[in-house]
Structures are given as structure tokens and as C-alpha cells.
């Protein structure tokens, strides 16, 4: 049964998936808030664990098929990575605004304030 056959490279997916689920459990237990930022690592971790356990089955079942799909997925990932690096570079390059000295309050977007906290 290929579903339980775990190859050498599949352990990486399983370990990363466990880290994602552990991150979600720790952040939710410490902070107590549920939002996309706390739940997404757990969901991605569950998908990584599933892929790590079923990779051998998928490789055996679809060997040599859907080559065009693999090329399309890799091209999409390269486009995503390139655009991510460009946008992050622009964000980092343009974050040098000094804080005025006579400022009474500063609003930090995404700080997650609840009441006076």
C-alpha cells in the first residue's frame, strides 16, 4: 500500500506540516484569537502532511502523465516567487519615513488591539 510508504524526501513535508500545526496550536493557545494568520499555518501543515504521506502513491499512479500540468505549476510558482520578491523589495526600500517628534499617537495597522490592550 503506497499511502503508508514514505520516501526519504517525504519526511521533509511531514516535518514542515507538523511545525505548521504546532505553530497554530501554540499561537491560538497563547493569544486566544482565531483569524486567517493563526489558522493558515495549520491548514498548510495538514496539506503538507497529507502530501508527504500520499506522495509515493501519486508518483506511482501518475508516472509520466500530466507533464504539461507539472510544467504549468512550476511556471506559476516561478511567476509568484518573482512577483513576491519584487513587491517585497519595493516595500522594504520605501519604509524609511522618519517619525515626527511632536507625535502624540501612532496608529499601527494590524496591531490587533482589543480595547485598552
Image (cartoon, rainbow, N blue to C red):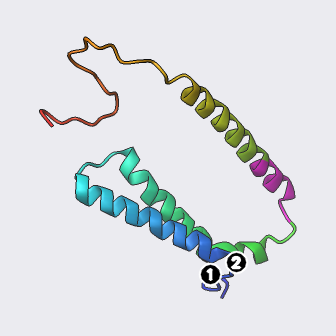
State the predominant SS element of the stretch in magenta.
Answer: helix
Q: Secondary structure at mark 1?
A: loop
At which x and y percent is residue 106? 27, 21
Q: Which mark is residue 3?
A: 1
Instruction: Name the residue rendered at 87%, 68% in the picture.
Output: 64
Q: Quadrant of the C terminus?
A: top left
State how far apart marks 1 and 2 are (Cα): 6 Å
Q: Residue furthest left?
A: 116
Question: Closer to the camera, 95 or 101?
Answer: 101
The residue wearing badge 2 is 57
What is the quadrant of the N terminus in the image? bottom right
Query: In the figure, 62 relative to 8: above or below?
Result: above
Is 54 in front, or is 49? Answer: 49
The crowd level at tag 2 (other Cα within 10 Å; few <14, some 14-19, many 20+) is some
Q: Based on the displayed image, in which of its 4 quarters is residue 88 positioned?
A: top right
**The residue stretch that appears in magenta:** 65-74
CB of mark 1 within 8 Å of CB of mark 2?
A: yes
Residue lying at the far bottom in this picture: please name it: 1
- Residue 48 at x, y = what percent? 56, 65
Task: Tell whether 102 sits left or right of 87.
Answer: left
Disc 1 crowd, CA 10 A, few/some/many (<14, 14-19, 20+)? some
Q: Earlier in the sequence, mark 1 or mark 2?
A: 1
Amino acid at each position: 500500500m503506497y499511502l503508508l510508504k514514505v520516501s526519504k524526501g517525504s519526511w521533509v513535508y511531514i516535518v514542515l506540516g507538523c511545525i505548521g500545526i504546532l505553530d497554530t496550536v501554540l499561537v491560538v493557545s497563547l493569544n486566544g484569537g482565531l483569524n486567517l494568520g493563526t489558522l493558515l499555518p495549520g491548514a498548510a501543515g495538514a496539506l503538507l502532511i497529507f502530501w508527504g504521506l500520499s506522495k509515493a502513491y501519486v508518483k506511482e499512479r501518475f508516472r509520466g502523465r500530466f507533464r504539461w500540468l507539472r510544467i504549468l505549476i512550476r511556471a506559476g510558482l516561478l511567476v509568484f516567487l518573482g512577483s513576491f520578491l519584487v513587491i517585497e523589495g519595493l516595500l522594504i526600500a520605501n519604509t524609511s519615513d522618519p517619525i515626527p517628534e511632536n507625535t502624540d499617537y501612532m496608529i499601527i495597522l494590524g496591531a490587533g488591539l482589543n480595547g485598552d490592550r
